[in-house]
Amino acid sequence: MVTATLLTADDFPGELGDSYFSACAQLGLEANKDGYGIILCQDEGGARWTEFTTDVRGVDSVNSVLEMGYVAAGYEPDPATVVSLRPGWPLTCAVGYAELLEPHDPPGVQAADLLHAPEPDWIPVGRRCLADQIVNELRSGGHLGEEQYVDNYQFDAYNIGDHNPNPPARFIDVRRLVAADHPARQHLDAALVQAWSLARRDDLAPGSIRLWKTWPREKYVVRANGSSWTLIALVGGPAVLLLDHVADVPLALDEVPDLPALLDALMAAAGRSPI
């Protein structure tokens, strides 16, 4: 196992789709209630392979270990839980086993049968990947202002012996307000109308609205996806909108008057998801 991630209605890689159904369809899997684990592997020759397992709890546990900074975590799913083994990797992954050849496609496999990560320069994929990063920022420290974030990072770095710490920039700190006469404003307003419409629906596609609790303050991060937009917000904190029409630029929603009501409506709608 090189790495692992979840594919459930509550947690799936944005690379794969705007909803749990679309992510499963991308991989040829049935969108069931419990979901799957995605395990990226290499064979003895270094070729890429992907296992899909129903052992969601096991993958969740090993993924938690990896997120804590451990570079390796031993895990093999029970063969009885593996529903598919396919050549290639469906997700972007820049690492592999040092003792093996560089990760590569298995020889002799038809191109149509290979799994490949979606092209990152395709705007909807880039939007969803950026949304994944912003969700992680808000879950881990969205309650911190930029100055406090830098101070905390430098304090922690000094404590482990790094005397020249350079904290990575956060996307939430470069979000931009959109003036009423800006060309992007009509797209922002249209996306907010669609977000309200999504919040009122009773037939939501699972995963089109997702919620996470933050640590340590027990607030919620809300993410809602439309066909050309993604809204991400920490309740009571930063909120951004990503638009395909304004690629790679987080647009600030902090001054939208009815944002708290919209977030409440989206959270309520998430609870009505059929899965």
Image (spheres, rainbow, N blue to C red):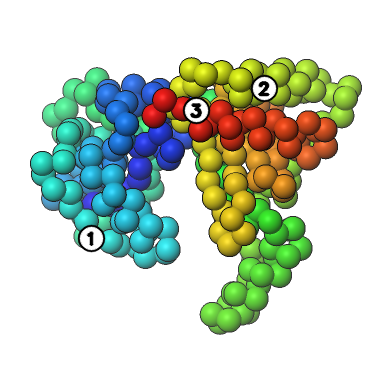
Q: Disc 3 marks which amino acid?
A: Arg
Q: In the displayed structure, would residue 37 be above or below residue 160?
A: above
Label 2: which secondary element: helix
Residue bearing the label numbered 1:
74
The residue sitting at 32% across, 56% down in the picture is 61
The residue sitting at 25% across, 35% down in the picture is 88
Q: Disc 2 marks which amino acid?
A: Trp
Disc on res. 272: 3
Q: Residue 60 location, x and y as percent?
A: 33, 51
Callout 3: few (<14), some (14-19), or many (20+) C-alpha neighbours within 10 Å? Answer: some
Q: CA distance from mark 1 to mark 2?
A: 44 Å
Q: In the displayed structure, would residue 177 be above or below residue 124?
A: below
Label 1: which secondary element: loop
Say whether residue 162 is visible. yes
Disc on res. 196: 2
State the count of labels.
3
| Left or right: 257 in relation to 19 | right
Q: CA distance from mark 3 to mark 2?
A: 15 Å
